[in-house]
Image (cartoon, grey):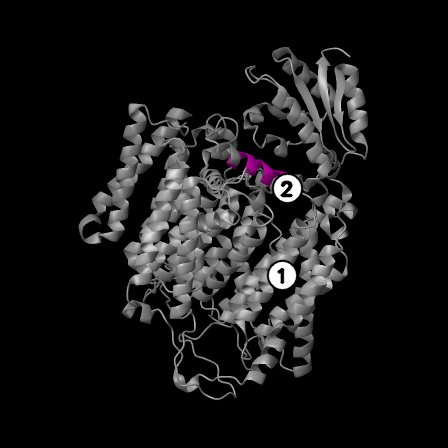
């Protein structure tokens, strides 16, 4: 990226000390915090959280349903405990404080609710009230205590002689300049959202439904980000961030807000898990491996109860937006930790947002786990950093350490250890793959002497192995050969992750999958080239090398059902984005006209990433959206299940072409008996006969999105389900008990037609 | 309702207790090095934890 800060150099690493920009405006004679908000704003933030927490505790205690309870509950569960802890130890209020507070709160919720679910009879109400009281007491102490030296130290001030105050007309001009692209883009994109026609979604996915001028709107917002970052004499990081948030909202909003129901059946299934636990249900470890890492689901069930809602479906549309913005904020702070200027870090956040097609930010454990991993890495790099006077050979080869040390708050080594172990514990109980990523990253950072502790890696690795061996045994008992048989078998891993992902798919889907691969490879290639450039100029922080390559280690160990490459791409993306953002291309273009062409070309490239992302990210929308017709089919099947005698075991067996996730909300007892129908009718008939011999009631649910999924993923011809059912009907007796425009519910009547 | 290992058997309880003690020793080795970072303490803690996990895997497989 060229000339973002108006300076030329091999890299855009920040100077050791931050200085303020001078402008032509008159001087002001007071001091003002740069990174932190002021005293009044701090008190306002503390007070607001205190009030919302108290309200959440009160509403949970009496289980009152009032408007706004969901917001209060969200504050109590995902912000308040961590915020209280950090404010008690006088942490400054900066972006990372907010992110760390959320991570700590979520970790607290996961750990506490796991104990509630397994040992304490799911006493969510008592837990919510006790947590709220603790937060109220803590925040009251924070508000009542006098401001002291630590608070004063937490404020980075600007010297009076460089601080200038703008004139009113200057302010208006500046504001208009800062937000003109964003405002225009937002209006155009919102109009585009209103004119999005989901009926037009086809094999290319969401991009077919969105009007073309929507992308003019997103282009204007992206240009607004770049314009604010390269504005002279003062770039505005805050204005750029307003644009990034707007971009995320319209990009994900055009998908979430235009569809009649929350999208993605897997997210519905996670809602079903959370709802099952929220109602005091047991962990179904023998039915699904995810119950061996139940932290996310118990915490989500807890939030459902505290919010007083029937399900967590309300969170599905918001989750991708919130997770993307918070992830981008983590990338931003990590970039600053690794020595990037704030403008460069913001650019890295933008690149992360525009290249993250991996779509692991939905309502799922891995979304939270991703945040936890990078919050831990950032905190360790800030507070447990190492600056060896004589680094060993491997460290020197991997790069150097240029970033100034920026310790977070007053945590110290002990406090950091405790916080990291707490976050890691929550990670270990919540997701099976992310702890391996964390271990690889922390281990790599310790090996290249970028952090000062190797024991932390060992402790987390042992704790993870301990959890797998004692608490998640149902995940691996009987599957040890599957889990460990692929170690080092690179050809099998590549085959599962690359070749088999689209081998039998429709032509369009194969193109979409190839576009994804191409995006991933291009990102890695550019990041690798930037890494080499930085290394050549001896400006490469060795943490970049570790963060870029460590996520490949788990891929070598385990293909993860063909999804290992996706996780590797996701976890290496922050480092790739930071590397791309850190190189200043203006060094290579000397002539002024050429610089303009390069800048224009890069702007066009950045702008065009949005439609590309819409294709790669939401290319499966034809079968990943949940239509009204699908829900009507599930409702018909649900009525049959609900009317049935629950004392039968198993009462009803349900077959479908894909997992009927929405059907399972509130009916998790049927989860073990909901199975996929085999692809071949003859095999399907055999399975149906076996089930019919075991239980009286066997049904087949056919949803429209399942039919399209088979067409897209397995390359079946359009209308294949009619041939399939005709052939199946020749082998077993089928009766249509309910039907909609695109789906139906069939009952298997007898063994013979 | 419990996790997979219900920790009701004596061997489970002993294994988990040893594992937690070993992890605590490793943590203390970093936070209170003056008292707990002796090589024999740290190596013993590490290999004990590894042994407990390995035995568990071998037994269950």
Residue name at image x 46 percent, y 73 percent: A14
Q: Nearer the viewer, residue A316 or A410?
A: A316
Q: Determine the secondary structure under disc 1.
A: helix
Was residue A270 drawn as part of the magenta stretch in this picture?
A: yes
* Residue that numbered label 1 is attached to: A247
Q: In the displayed structure, would residue A451 be above or below residue A747?
A: below
Q: Position of residue A110 (x, y in %)?
A: 42, 42
Whichever of callouts 2 and 1 sits on the residue coming sooner in the sequence is 1
Q: Residue at x 22, y 52 (%)?
A: B32
**Residue A585 appears in the picture as rendered:** no
Magenta: main secondary structure equals helix
Q: State how many labels appear.
A: 2
A317 relative to A382, above or below: above
**Which residue is identified by label 2?**
A264
- The residue closer to the viewer here, B57 or A390, is B57
For the N terminus of chain A, give its image quadrant.
Answer: bottom right
> Which quadrant is the C terminus of chain A positioned in?
top right
Magenta highlight range? A264-274
Could you tell whether A475 is left or right of A460 in the image? Answer: right
Question: Which of the 4 image quadrants contains residue A716?
Answer: top right
Q: Position of residue B44 (x, y in %)?
A: 24, 40
x and y percentages locating residue A552 in the rendered image: 51, 49
- Could you tell me if residue A289 is visible in this image? yes
Q: Residues within 10 Å of mark 1 (few under 14, many from 20)?
A: many
Reply above or below: A258 against A740: below
Mark 2 neighbour density, 10 Å: few (under 14) some (14–19) many (20 or more): some
């Amino acid at each position: 990226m060229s000339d973002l800060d108006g300076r030329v150099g091999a890299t855009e690493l920040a100077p050791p000390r931050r200085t303020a920009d001078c402008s032509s405006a008159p001087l002001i004679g007071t001091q003002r915090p740069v990174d932190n908000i002021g005293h009044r704003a701090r008190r306002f933030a503390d007070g607001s959280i205190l009030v919302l927490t108290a309200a959440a505790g009160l509403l949970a205690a009496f289980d009152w349903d009032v408007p706004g309870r969901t917001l209060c509950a969200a504050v109590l569960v995902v912000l308040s405990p961590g915020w209280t802890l950090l404010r008690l130890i006088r942490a400054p209020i900066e972006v990372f404080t907010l992110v760390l507070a959320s991570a700590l709160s979520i970790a607290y919720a996961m750990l506490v609710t796991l104990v509630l679910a397994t040992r304490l009879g799911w006493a969510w109400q008592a837990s919510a009230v006790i947590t709220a009281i603790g937060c109220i007491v803590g925040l009251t102490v924070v508000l009542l205590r006098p401001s002291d030296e630590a608070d004063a130290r937490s404020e980075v001030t600007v010297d009076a002689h460089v601080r200038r105050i703008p004139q009113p007309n200057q302010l208006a001009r500046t504001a208009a300049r800062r937000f003109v692209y964003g405002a225009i883009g937002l209006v155009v994109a919102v109009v585009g959202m209103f004119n999005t026609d989901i009926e037009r979604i086809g094999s290319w996915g969401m991009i077919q439904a969105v009007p073309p001028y929507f992308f003019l709107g997103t282009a204007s917002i992206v240009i607004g980000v770049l314009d604010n970052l390269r504005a002279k004499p003062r770039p505005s990081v805050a204005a750029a961030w307003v644009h990034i948030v707007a971009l995320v909202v319209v990009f994900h909003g055009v998908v979430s807000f235009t569809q009649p129901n929350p999208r993605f059946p897997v997210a519905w299934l996670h809602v079903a898990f959370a709802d099952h636990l929220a109602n005091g249900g047991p962990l179904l470890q023998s039915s699904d491996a995810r119950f061996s890492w139940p932290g996310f689901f118990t915490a989500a069930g807890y939030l459902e109860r505290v919010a007083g809602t029937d399900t967590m479906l309300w969170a599905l549309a918001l989750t991708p937006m919130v997770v993307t913005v918070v992830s981008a904020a983590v990338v931003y702070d990590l970039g600053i930790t690794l020595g990037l200027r704030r403008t460069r870090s913001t650019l890295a956040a933008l690149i992360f947002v525009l290249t993250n097609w991996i779509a692991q930010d939905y309502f799922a454990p891995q979304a939270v786990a991703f945040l936890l991993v990078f919050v831990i890495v950032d905190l360790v790099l800030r507070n447990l950093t190492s600056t060896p006077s004589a680094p060993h050979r491997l460290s020197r080869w991997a790069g150097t350490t240029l970033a100034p040390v920026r310790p977070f708050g007053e945590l110290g080594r002990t406090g950091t250890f405790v916080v990291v172990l707490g976050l890691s514990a929550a990670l270990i109980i919540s997701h099976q793959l992310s702890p391996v990523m964390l271990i690889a990253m922390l281990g790599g950072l310790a090996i290249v002497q970028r952090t000062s502790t190797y024991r932390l890696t060992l402790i987390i690795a042992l704790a993870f192995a301990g959890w797998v061996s004692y608490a998640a045994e149902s995940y691996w008992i009987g599957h040890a050969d599957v889990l460990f048989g692929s170690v080092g078998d690179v050809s099998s891993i590549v085959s599962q992750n690359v070749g088999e992902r689209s081998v039998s798919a429709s032509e369009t889907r194969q193109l979409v999958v190839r576009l994804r691969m191409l995006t991933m490879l291009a990102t890695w290639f550019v990041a690798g080239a930037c890494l080499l450039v930085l290394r050549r100029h001896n400006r490469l922080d060795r943490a970049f090398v570790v963060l870029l390559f460590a996520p490949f280690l788990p891929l070598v160990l385990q293909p993860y059902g063909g999804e290992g490459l996706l996780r590797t791409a996701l976890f290496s993306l922050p480092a790739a984005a930071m590397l791309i953002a850190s190189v200043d291309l203006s060094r290579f273009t000397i002539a002024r006209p050429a610089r303009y062409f390069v800048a224009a070309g890069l702007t066009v490239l950045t702008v065009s990433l949005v439609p590309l992302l819409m294709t790669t990210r939401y290319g499966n929308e034809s079968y990943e959206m949940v239509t009204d017709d699908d829900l009507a089919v599930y409702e018909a099947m649900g009525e049959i299940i609900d009317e049935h005698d629950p004392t039968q075991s198993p009462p009803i067996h349900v077959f479908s072409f894909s997992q009927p996730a929405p059907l399972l909300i509130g009916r998790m007892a049927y989860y073990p008996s909901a199975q996929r129908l085999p692809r071949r009718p003859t095999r399907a008939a055999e399975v149906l006969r076996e089930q019919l011999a075991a239980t009286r009631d066997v049904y087949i649910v056919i949803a429209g999105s399942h039919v399209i999924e088979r067409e897209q993923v397995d390359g079946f011809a359009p209308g294949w389900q009619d041939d399939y059912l005709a052939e199946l009907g020749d082998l077993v007796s089928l009766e249509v008990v309910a039907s909609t425009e695109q789906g139906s519910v069939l009952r298997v009547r007898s063994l013979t037609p | 309702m419990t996790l997979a290992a219900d920790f009701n058997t004596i061997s489970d309880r002993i294994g988990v207790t040893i594992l937690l003690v070993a992890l605590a020793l490793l943590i203390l080795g970093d936070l209170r090095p003056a008292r707990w970072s002796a090589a024999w303490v740290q190596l013993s803690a590490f290999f004990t934890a590894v042994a407990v996990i390995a035995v568990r895997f071998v037994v269950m497989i």
